[in-house]
Image (spheres, rainbow, N blue to C red):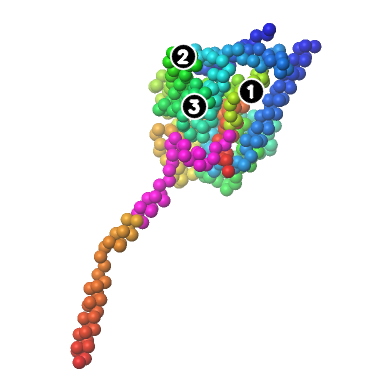
Amino acid sequence: MNKSNSLTTQYENVNNVSRSQDSTSDNTFVNCVISYDTTRKLDFLILVIETLQINATDSLLLKARDSGMSGDFTNRVQLWKIRCSNPLRKTYTFSSLSDEQIDSLVVLISSMAEKLYPLIRQLLSSKESKTLNKERWILFSSRLKSLIRERMNFKRSYISSLLSDESNEFFRELLVILSLSCGTGGANRLKASLYNQS
Amino acid sequence: MINLSYRFDQNSSSLELAGMPDVSNGDSESTIGIIFSWTLKIIGCPLLEGEKEHLDNLMQVILQYSRSYISGIRKTFVSNKKIVTISPFGISHKLLLNSTKKGVKPLEIILDDSELSDLTRCLDLLRYDPRFNIRWDINQERPYSKKYIRQNLSNPNKNFNFFYSFIIFLFTSTLLVLIPTNNKFELKESTNSYQSLSEQSQ
């Protein structure tokens, strides 16, 4: 009897936590607008996930299906159309993302980042062997660059500068974003970074 | 009295909290409502321990820093009671911990990106753990204003095109103003020819 009581109070606590999170997130994003670089940032984050895991799109779609997301995320073409809202793509669709689409993408990216965290951590760590780290970075950057060359409009000066940049500063920034986006707290952090106060 | 202890491990960081349920607040047997102590182990650094107030200060600073770092902003954050400070240190991050005890020197810890994310994840896990019924003194993640981001970007991509064009405009216009024109000479010549014509007619 006592155990069941404690369990129910525990569930109540969980519900209270989630309720308070919902209400705070509702209040937090009042009077906020989607940042101009949101579509670009989200697409590049998915690109990094694809670099770290082959067939990451399948995992994303499976995750979306498991968590009961809308039809936009259950088929490959729809997901591709959403990603084409990135103005730096070869196939830019001149569309923008809705709040719901951003929420779903944040959840997906956050869960994928959690799954790939050990790999992300290895790349960001400065306390491992330097030669090993260098090799990892060469592999990672070459694969990411080949994906960028394949999908992005390299006539844009931004893309050509990314491809010619040897310091991989932007790629490191993307990895940092992914490492700080894991879990519930990380998803909230990532979402907050995609909006601007108006 | 029920003593509870929970631990959060993330690669290089391990945070352990000990406490008990706050019965007056209706906490269940497995929920911590009052914290007695906490210890934080970061690989390669001394063991950190303290009271709830110290943990609040640490959480304030680390979570605010991570929030700004994810937006590309790297700036120093100091906790409300100035116990904890975090600031950028090259490509790493410097965590400065001031002891509340007198005569104890501040402790300096250098964290790289992976250690910072480990620590942030530990604190996130604690913050959203339903087994804790504690009001943390931390801010919610909020979007920044465009102005704030522009002012604090660590690697500002400033657009100097307008400034350059203005300088070029000023330079060329000053040049054009200062170069002497030959209007006077042409005028003289024209009057001369007129005079010569009139003389001829006479």
Foreground residue among B6 and A148: B6
Foreground residue among A140 and B187: B187
Any magenta on residue B147? Answer: yes
Q: Earlier in the sequence, mark 2 or mark 3?
A: 3
Q: Position of residue A149 (x, y in %)?
A: 47, 39
Q: What amino acid is labelled 3 in the image?
A: Val
The chain containing the residue under callout 1 comes to B
| Residue for badge 1 | B135
* Element under disc 1: loop
Q: Residue furthest bottom?
A: B202
Rendered image quadrant of residue A105? top right
State the separation of the CA atoms marked 2 and 3.
20 Å
Report whether residue B116 is seen: no
Q: Which mark is residue B102?
A: 2
Image: magenta residue range: B142-169
Q: Position of residue A191 (x, y in %)?
A: 59, 34
Look at the image and tell me in which quarter the C terminus of chain B lies.
bottom left
Q: Position of residue A15 (x, y in %)?
A: 72, 25
The chain containing the residue under callout 2 comes to B
| Residue for badge 3 | B78
Q: Residues within 10 Å of mark 2 (few under 14, many from 20)?
A: few
Any magenta on residue A119? Answer: no
Q: What amino acid is labelled 1 in the image?
A: Arg
Where A197 falls versus B38 (above or below)? below
Report whether residue B12 is seen: yes
Foreground residue among A63 and B106: B106
